[in-house]
Each structure stands twice: as structure tokens, then as C-alpha cells.
């Protein structure tokens, strides 16, 4: 749907500087309508994510069979599978066995809807929007699977890395050369005469190495110091994906937000449980996912402000 919208805008439209593109394309679609479509689409994707979050960790197909009640096994009819609304209509209980349906289902749908609206607000209805929506969708799946199972499955992180690289190649052509903030700084020196996709991939590589590398280093250091395996390779692969997509500046911000929120939550949980041995295991991917979404939505002004402190 977004591709269609975007193509319409492109053919209708005009070559503008990238900075004003979002602004101008927004003027052509009534924003409220666009945001409603984004929100509804997000809720539907959230409904699909519920299937992914439930089935991927237990290695079931995400396509077959149709959704079933986890308690009584009854197939869920399409009219009982409408995002959020069905949960409200059924008052959170299975139509067959009356067992409580986890609040996670409508929560994932509402969260994904809200994130889609936020990303549409951030990007405008531009060709970059579908890419950012896919990125956020992968993050939501990783966050909820990690929260429940403490794993970040390869079936999401590996395609995520490939997706990030493809986006890196495509987006500078769709959105203009300076879209990724690391491209201008890489365009000099040895890369000066290279096509933009090579420069963009170089930025992806640097971001991936900084993202994955720092996670690997944290885990390695912690293991040497404490003798326990603290960081799974899943976190490293997740940060390869995030780093390649966001570039090194936003990746550092992602890790900063992840460590900060993870520490705060960890300290609160340890204080409540009266633990003192610092061995509480937290799904770090949850906090890295939070950090990556924050970096995507709010990172550019934060990075600009931070860089401004040194001028
Ligand atoms: Zn049931």
C-alpha cells in the first residue's frame, strides 16, 4: 500500500531537496487519513507478529495451521481474530473454553499500531517509510521473543541483516544521497569516486562492526571478569542488523539507551527481589530494541545536539 502511495507521489512529484521532501509529500495526502491507514496496517501486522512471537521460538510454521486457542485448541474464526477489537468483544476470553487470552496479544497489536503511526510521522509518506516499518516490525518480534524466551532467533536476525544491507543500497537512490547521515562523511578520501551504494554499504559495515563488535566485547569482558556467559550471540547478530541499518552514530545511541534502561530496570528488579549477587539475567535484546526504536525516531536531533557540544 505504501509502495503504491509512494509511487504516486514520485510520478506526480518533483525533484526536491531531501530535507523538504517529507514536508512536501505530506501536503499531498490528508495527514489524518495517512496516519489512520498506518495505524490500522500496524495493528494487522501486530496480529501477524503475535503468531511469529508464539510460533518462531517453538519452531512452528508461521503460515500453517490457522490460529488456534492455546488452551482448548479450537480454531479461531476470522471474526474473532480482528486486532484489538476481537479481544475487547470477547472480553479477553476464548469463545470456546472461556480461558483468558493473554493481554500480550492486544498489547502487541496496539504497540505495533502506535509504532507505525510514529514512524509515519517521522518519515512522512516517503519511499523510506516501508523500509523503516519493516525494521521496526523485526524489532518488535525480537523484543517480545527475547522477553519471553531469552533468545533472539537467527530466522529473524539473519534476514534482518540482509534486509539492512538491501535497504542501504536502495534508500540513497530513492531518498537522495545524504539520507544516511554517515554517507557525507564517508564520501571523501578513498571512497570519493565510488558509486553511492558502495559508500552506503561501507557505512553499513562500520555500523555493524561497531554495533555487533561492542556487544561482543561487552559479553567477552563480562565473561572474563565474572566467569559467566552474560551476552548471547543473538544480541551480537541483532546489533549487526541495527548497526548496518542505522549507521554508527545512531547505533552508539542505541547501545547507550539499551544499557541505561537495562541497568535501571535491572537495579529496580534486584532491589525488589533483595538480590545482591548481580546475577540477575535480563533479556538485553528487549532494551536494545527499545534503544533502536528510540534512535530511529528521535536520534537525529540528539546526535546533532551532541555533535554541536564540540563545535
Ligand atoms: Zn479456548
Image (cartoon, rainbow, N blue to C red):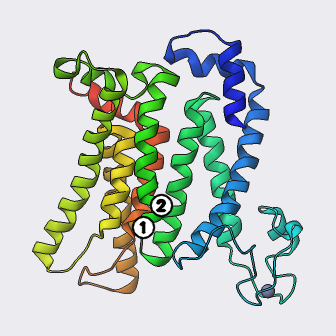
Q: Which mark is residue 156?
A: 2
Compared to residue 27, the image places residue 102 above or below, namely below
Q: Quadrant of the C terminus?
A: top left
Q: Report if residue 182 is visible in the image.
A: no
Residue labelled with disc 1: 152
Above-or-below relation of 145 to 167: below
In the image, what residue occupies the spot 42% across and 67% down?
A: 152
**In this orientation, which residue lies closer to the viewer: 302 or 124?**
124
Q: At numbered mark 1, what does the secondary structure look like: helix, strand or loop?
A: loop
Residue 252 x %, y % = 29, 45
Q: Nearer the viewer, mark 1 or mark 2?
A: 2
Please indicate, yes or no, whether residue 163 appears anywhere in the rendered image.
yes
Q: Secondary structure at mark 2?
A: helix
Q: Is residue 231 above or below residue 206?
A: below
Q: State left or right for residue 75 relative to residue 216.
A: right
Q: Is residue 85 above or below residue 117?
A: below
- The image quadrant where one finds ligand 1 is bottom right
Q: Which mark is residue 100?
A: none
Amino acid at each position: 500500500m505504501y509502495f503504491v502511495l509512494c509511487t504516486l507521489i514520485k510520478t506526480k512529484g518533483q525533484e526536491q531537496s531531501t530535507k523538504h521532501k517529507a514536508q512536501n509529500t505530506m501536503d499531498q495526502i490528508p495527514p489524518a487519513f495517512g496516519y489512520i491507514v498506518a495505524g490500522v496496517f500496524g495493528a494487522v501486522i501486530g496480529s501477524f507478529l503475535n503468531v511469529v512471537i508464539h510460533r518462531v521460538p517453538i519452531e512452528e510454521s508461521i503460515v500453517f495451521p490457522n490460529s488456534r486457542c492455546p488452551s482448548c485448541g479450537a480454531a479461531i474464526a476470522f471474526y474473532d481474530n480482528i486486532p484489538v477489537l476481537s479481544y475487547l468483544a470477547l472480553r479477553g476470553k476464548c469463545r470456546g473454553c472461556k480461558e483468558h487470552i493473554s493481554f500480550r496479544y492486544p498489547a502487541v497489536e496496539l504497540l505495533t499500531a502506535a509504532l507505525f503511526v510514529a514512524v509515519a510521522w517521522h518519515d512522512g509518506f516517503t519511499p523510506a517509510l516501508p523500509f523503516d516499518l519493516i525494521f521496526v516490525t523485526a524489532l518488535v518480534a525480537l523484543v517480545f521473543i527475547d522477553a519471553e524466551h531469552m533468545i533472539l532467533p537467527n530466522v529473524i536476525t539473519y534476514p534482518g541483516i540482509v534486509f539492512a544491507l538491501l535497504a542501504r543500497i536502495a534508500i540513497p537512490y530513492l531518498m537522495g544521497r545524504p539520507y544516511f547521515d554517515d554517507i557525507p562523511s564517508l564520501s571523501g578520501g578513498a571512497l570519493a569516486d565510488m558509486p553511492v551504494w558502495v559508500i552506503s554499504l561501507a557505512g553499513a559495515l562500520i555500523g555493524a562492526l561497531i554495533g555487533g563488535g561492542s556487544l561482543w566485547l561487552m559479553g567477552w569482558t563480562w565473561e572474563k571478569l565474572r566467569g559467566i556467559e552474560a551476552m548471547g550471540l543473538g544480541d551480537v547478530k541483532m546489533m549487526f542488523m541495527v548497526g548496518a541499518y542505522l549507521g554508527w552514530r545512531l547505533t552508539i545511541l542505541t547501545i547507550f539507551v539499551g544499557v541505561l534502561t537495562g541497568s535501571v530496570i535491572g537495579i529496580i528488579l534486584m532491589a525488589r527481589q533483595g538480590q545482591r549477587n548481580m546475577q540477575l539475567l535480563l533479556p538485553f535484546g528487549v532494551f536494545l530494541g527499545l534503544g533502536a526504536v528510540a534512535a530511529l525516531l528521535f536520534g537525529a536531533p540528539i546526535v546533532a545536539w551532541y555533535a554541536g557540544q564540540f563545535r
